[in-house]
Every structure is written in C-alpha cells, then in structure tokens.
Image (spheres, helix red, strand yellow):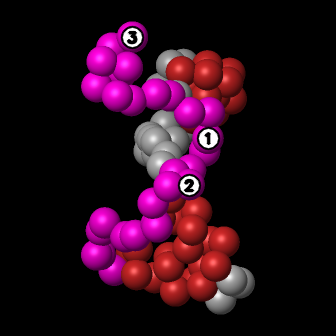
Amino acid sequence: AVLREDGLVLAGLGHDPWRTPRRFLRQPRYDAMEACLDRTGPAGRAMMRASASVQVCVDAGYEEPGPLGHVRRWWLAHHLGAVLVAVF
C-alpha cells in the first residue's frame, strides 16, 4: 500500500528489465571483473550491472574450540545461510 501511494509496485524479478544496465562504480576491482566477464559474452556484464547482492566478510576464527574457533564459525555459516537467504 505504501509503494502504491508513490505509483510503485513490487515485481518478482531478479533484474531490472526496463532500463539498460549501466555501471555505477569506476574502481579497479570492477574494471577487472567486467573485463573478465566480457571474455565469455554479454551475460556476465548484464549480471554485473543489473543485479544486486549482499556480501558479508568475516574472519575465519581462531584455531581453538569454542565460539571464536573456526570450526564453530564454519558450522554457524552453514546453518545460518538459509536464514540469511530468506531474509534478503
């Protein structure tokens, strides 16, 4: 209802089919990624420009048992992955 007040609707699409994809960031990392993706055709560039993701980086942990150990963090990452996917 809030979106409709502004003339917007939700669409169940993983990309924006209405606008030509364009790059927003000009940084060496994205220049390299685009060059690499271009080697296999236009699909990689389209994905890079017309989709979004959430990336989370965490330390692997310590080589010890307990909540800060890498074994525990690995276990948590696998068990919380489905929850995080559902949230986003």
Amino acid type, callout 1: Leu
Q: Main secondary structure of the magenta part?
A: loop
Q: Quick check: is 14 in the magenta stretch?
A: yes
Percent x, y for residue 34?
A: 50, 79
Label 2 element class: loop
Pointers 3 and 2 in contact (C-beta within 8 Å): no
Q: Is residue 86 above or below residue 49?
A: above
Q: Residues within 10 Å of mark 1 (few under 14, many from 20)?
A: few
Q: Quick check: is 33 in the magenta stretch?
A: no
Name the image quarter holding the N terminus: top left
Q: Report if residue 38 is visible in the image.
A: yes
Q: Residue at x 58, y 63 (%)?
A: 47
Percent x, y for residue 42?
A: 64, 79
Give the spatial CA distance, label 1 vs label 3. 19 Å
Q: Say which quarter of the image contains residue 78.
A: top right
Q: Which residue bears the numbered disc 2?
A: 17
Mark 3 vs mark 2: which is more N-terminal?
Answer: 3
Amino acid type, callout 2: Pro
Label 1 element class: loop
Label 3 element class: loop
Q: Residue at x 51, y 42 (%)?
A: 60
Give the spatial CA distance, label 1 vs label 2. 8 Å
Q: Residue at x 31, y 66 (%)?
A: 24
Q: Which residue bears the numbered disc 3?
A: 1
Pointers 1 and 2 in contact (C-beta within 8 Å): yes
Q: Which residue bears the numbered disc 1?
A: 13
